[in-house]
Amino acid sequence: MFFDRHNQKNSSEKEASGDITCTSCFGNNNRCGCDCGCPGQGATGPRGATGPMGPVGPRGCPGVTGPMGPRGCQGSVGPAGPMGPQGEPGMPGVMGPAGEAGPAGATGSTGPTGPAGATGPTGLAGATGPVGATGPAGPAGSAGPTGPAGEVGPTGPAGATGPTGPAGATGPAGPAGEAGPTGPTGATGPTGPAGATGPTGPAGATGPTGPVGADGPIGPTGPAPTPAAAVADATGTEDAVTQLNTLLANLRAAGILQS
């Protein structure tokens, strides 16, 4: 609309441009104070040669606004303005009803098994939980039948006799026992008659000392004592007493230790 009014205005001004001075004066009854001085409009004569530009005359009165001209051509689209601020998000729409479930598709073929993944690192050991309460002891089971005695294994070779250990220290003497009660005094027998004292004989001469005899031959060595059966070493305080008693029994059986 702005372009139409502008074009119409220009068209009216162009139409009235040939007689704008006089029209302005007559239309205003020469009340504008201009120096137009138009007595009347005669026939237009031929245009003479353009003379030199004269001095600028006084400013004339503004002309009458002409009718609006025809609508001009549409101008080119101007550049897009900057984007305005984003509006507030709208309210969420109402969820529509759920559609009907479609038919199940056919089962596809099983794909090839992929390679086994690398084994991950072993996780840290978890904390040890608290020890639970001890449950009640169950009833003792019945004793099973005694199995048959195993065959006696062959006697192993006698081991070498170990060196004799040093004699142990003499223990302290025990306390003296109490004196027993004194027995009754027996009856005194009769005194016999005193015999006659015989004469004292002369002292005999002391004989010479005889030579020392030669040492006799050393007798044969007696048979070696039979070694006692071997006993396994004790593995703890639980079986130490059992192994010691077994060793003492073996020494007595071999005649090395008195019963």
Image: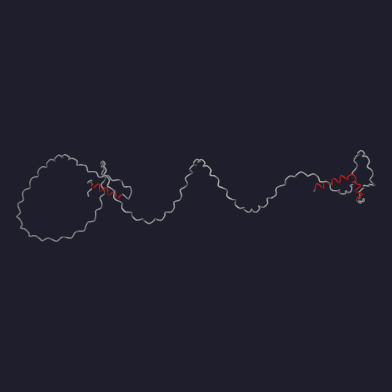
Residue 254: percent from left, percent from top = 23, 46
Residue 70: percent from left, percent from top = 83, 46
| Total count of labels | 0
Of residues 255 and 203, the one nearer the viewer is: 255
Of residues 131 and 149, the one nearer the viewer is: 149
Residue 72: percent from left, percent from top = 81, 45
Picture colour scheme: secondary structure
The correct choice, above or below, for 180 with respect to 247 in the image is below
Image-based side of 189 in relation to 154, left or right: left
Of residues 182 and 55, the one nearer the viewer is: 55
- Give the residue furthest to the top: 49
Residue 192: percent from left, percent from top = 6, 58
Image-based side of 196 in relation to 49, left or right: left
Of residues 183 and 204, the one nearer the viewer is: 183
- Give the residue furthest to the front: 103
Image-quadrant location for residue 52: top right
